[in-house]
Amino acid sequence: QITLRESGPTLVNPTQTLTLTCTFSGFSLTTSGVGVGWIRQPPGKALEWLAFIYWDDDHRYSPSLNSRLTVTKDTSKNQVFLTLTNMDPVDTATYYCAHRGRYCSGGDCAPYMDVWGKGTTVTVSS
Amino acid sequence: QSALTQPASVSGSPGQSITMSCAGTANDVGGYNLVSWFQQHPGKAPKLIFFGVSYRPSGVSSRFSGSKSGNTASLTISGLQAEDEADYYCSSYTNIGTLVFGTGTEVTVL
């Protein structure tokens, strides 16, 4: 059974750096095709994808946040870390991490995010 | 990259079928069969209900079906039930390996 849990500060001051931890179980980030995604959702607004980190250390970042985002992993501890610098009140949101797998059939592979954490709410305010 | 365009709201009566769209570009929805759909109830994490345009995860009701034509993907819910009332989001991988979500559709069961 795959589970993920986000943790980190609930309140951050403007200009500070946010670091969130995603602790997972039920899969390994050393398995080919596996990744972890980060997604956020401001109050009352739509989902926004932030980043992926993959089993092979490849990563992808949202172009709009690329200069502020870093995602790393510690496979020995089954943890993934998201760092977002220069926090602003517009970054107030619920932050989710999710398991990214893929289904392959006939040579074609389709990725998916099938299991999500419950999310952690981060408020940016002085 | 711009968010995929979804209608803000769709409604239907119990038992009816509804369809919601997800419009993108040739660089995302139109270029790849990598569209996913998520259902989100208030205060809950999103739940995957479709991926790869038409793959339904185990445990997801067969009343949900997905399709794609050109740069637009669609999700149909048949036999609408009260429990289907939720927000629905599409997502697609892009030509540079990033992901983009849709603007979200609120489904109301009348």
Image: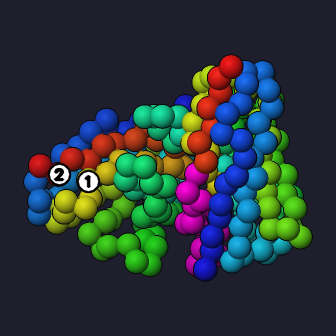
Using a 10 Å C-alpha cutoff, classify the residue at mark 2 as few (fewer than 14 neighbours), some (14 to 19) or many (20 or more).
some
Using a 10 Å C-alpha cutoff, classify the residue at mark 1 as few (fewer than 14 neighbours), some (14 to 19) or many (20 or more).
many
Report if residue A68 is visible in the image. Answer: yes
Q: Residue at x 77, y 74 (%)?
A: A28
Q: Does B37 appear above or below B102?
A: below
Q: Residue at x 38, y 72 (%)?
A: B60
Q: Residue at x 63, y 70 (%)?
A: A3
Which mark identifies residue B10? none
Report if residue A48 is visible in the image. Answer: no
Q: Give the SS element for disc 2.
A: strand
> Which residues, given as a range, are shown in magenta?
A98-119
Q: For this view, does A72 lie left or right of residue A124?
A: right
Q: Quadrant of residue B56?
A: bottom left
Q: Main secondary structure of the magenta part?
A: strand
Identified by mark 2, the residue type is Val
Q: Does A32 appear above or below A89?
A: below
Residue position for label 1: B85
Q: How many dots with numbers?
A: 2
Q: Are marks 2 and 1 in contact (CB under 8 Å)?
A: yes
Provide residue A98's location: percent of width, then percent of height: 63, 59
Q: Residue at x 65, y 60 (%)?
A: A5
Q: If the image is split into quadrants, where does the C terminus of chain A sit?
A: top right
Identified by mark 1, the residue type is Glu
Which mark identifies residue B109? 2
Q: Nearer the viewer, residue B53 or A82?
A: A82
Q: For this view, does A32 lie left or right of residue A91?
A: right
